[in-house]
Image (cartoon, rainbow, N blue to C red):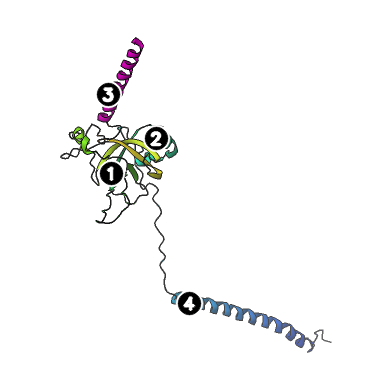
Amino acid sequence: MSTARATSPAVFPRLGLLCVPLLLAISGATSGCEQEQAAADLEEKKEAAAPKIKVELPPAPDFDEGKVEEQYADGSFSIYGLRTDIDGNVKKGDAGTEVMVKGYVQEIYVPPECPEGEICPPPKQPHVWITDKPDQLGKKRAMMVVNYRFSIPEWDAKRWKDQPDVIMEKGKQYTFKGKFKRFSDTGFAFDRGLLEFVAYKPHDPETGAELDSWVYPPNAPWHPLEVQRMDEENAALAEKAKAALDKKKSG
């Protein structure tokens, strides 16, 4: 008798049932991959069709822009140098300390014309704006220099006839002497500091070289000629008062 056993036909339906889910799973995975690929292809087509937009970013800021030496070989400050310790230098200026500042004339104030027959507000007092570099524009790094010119009455014009005047040209560099403040004695104000003018060193008109002598505004209270006049007047008053006191004692 043969030992081989015949496989029951009933087993095949069961294997068939097991294969169906496996085939469905494989089919579903294939369908999912196809969908993902189709979506990726569609996205790629959209990107290719989209207009190319060029993004331009602003240049990185130059933090060294406007920087110069804080103090020059002759001891004068730059505007940048004065403002590195603005509170300390303003405090010194308010106390009467004078400093030297070197700068280029950026702008000279010119009073506006008043039409004939109209009433116009009084013009501002003479002042200029100076910068550390000859090509600097705007007022961000500029500094005001005020009170560099005084009116001279006709009766006193003779006394000042031979005294040099303060004459500045736009674009030229000068060395100024003055008091660094935020508020001037004549009503000017600037939060980043201004210079109350005392004197300046002009330049030789032919060579352009800076002259050694200081020029003071004619008729300014601190002009050497005016200081001399006041000293002489005070000395004369003191002598007169002494003579009157001696006369009273002797009488």
Element under disc 3: helix
The earlier-in-sequence mark between 3 and 1 is: 1
As shown in the figure, which amino acid type bears the numbered disc 4?
Lys
Mark in front: 2 vs 1: 2
Gap in Å between the C-alphas at discs 3 and 1? 38 Å
The stretch of residues the image draws in magenta is 224-251
Q: Which residue is mark 1?
A: 104
Three-letter amino acid code of the residue under disc 3: Glu
**Do the numbered discs 4 and 3 sit on residues whose CB atoms are within 8 Å?**
no
Q: Is tag 4's residue or tag 2's residue first in the polypeptide sequence?
A: 4
Work out how far the residue at label 1 is from the one at label 4, CA to CA, in angstroms.
59 Å
Residue 208: which quarter of the image? top left
Q: Earlier in the sequence, mark 2 or mark 1?
A: 2
Q: CA distance from mark 3 to mark 2?
A: 28 Å
Q: Residues within 10 Å of mark 2 (few under 14, many from 20)?
A: many
Upstream in the sequence, badge 4 or badge 3?
A: 4
Q: Are marks 4 and 2 in contact (CB under 8 Å)?
A: no
Residue 166 in picture, x, y percent from top left: 24, 39
> Does 23 sit above or below residue 248?
below
Amino acid type shown at disc 1: Tyr
SS label for mark 1 = strand
- The residue pinned by badge 4 equals 46
Residue in the foreground of this view, choosing between 150 and 117:
117
Residue corresponding to mark 2 = 93
